[in-house]
Image (cartoon, helix red, strand yellow):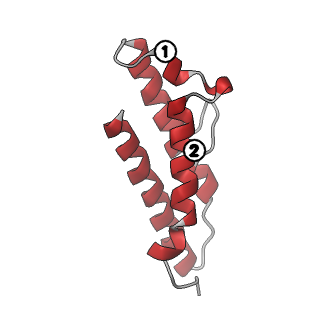
Amino acid sequence: MAKLYAHLVKSVYKCHYAMAKYAFAGKSFAEDACEDALGPESKSALARYQAKLQKLIDVGYCPACLGDPPSAPPAFTLATDAIADLDARNGELFPCPAP
């Protein structure tokens, strides 16, 4: 679980870096789609986290109670809280506004 969480955080930071890079180039970037879009075709950080978590549950490495999103299980809440916390701290990493 810790490795999966660390990978999520790293992926979200990559989204923030890409957003800053695109902003300074004067281009738009769909940060939310990169971070937390869910859906069958989504490649967002949260969607990849959920898919990997489900694989861990399917092979019996993690208990099934971690992967039931409708009831907001601990693993899903941990992921969404991490994304919200990283978004809130984004200004600390990128203090300058886009040109």
The image quadrant of residue 27 is: bottom right
Instruction: Please determine whether, in this image, residue 31 is positioned above or below residue 3.
Output: below
Q: Quadrant of the N terminus?
A: top left
Inspect this view and state whether residue 18 appears: yes
Q: Relative to 73, is 62 on the left or the right?
A: left
Residue positioned 57% across, 38% down in the render: 77
Residue 32, given in percent of the width and then of the height, sits at 63, 54
Q: What amino acid type is highlighted by mark number 2?
A: Thr
Residue 13 higher or lower than 38, as above or below: below
Distance from disc 1 to disc 2, alpha carbons, whole Å, reads 18 Å
Instruction: Classify mark 2: helix, strand or loop.
Output: helix
Q: How many marks?
A: 2
Indicate the amino acid at tag 1.
Answer: Ala
Of labels 1 and 2, earlier in sequence is 1
Q: Is residue 25 visible?
A: no
Image coordinates for residue 42, horizontal then vertical, percent: 58, 38
Q: Residues within 10 Å of mark 1 (few under 14, many from 20)?
A: some
Instruction: Tell me if mark 2 has few (under 14), some (14-19) or many (20+) residues whose alpha carbon lies within 10 angstroms of its own.
Output: some
Q: In which quadrant is the C terminus drawn?
A: bottom right
Residue on which disc 2 sits: 80
Q: Is residue 78 left or right of residue 30?
A: left
Tell me the tag on residue 64. Answer: 1
- Image point (64%, 33%), residue name: 39
Residue in view at x 50 percent, y 23 percent: 66
Q: Nearer the viewer, residue 19 or 41?
A: 19
- Left or right of 26 on screen, residue 55: left
| Residue furthest front in the image | 74
Determine contact: label 1, label 2, CB under 8 Å: no
The outermost residue toward the right is 70
Residue 28 versus residue 49: which sits nearer the camera? 49
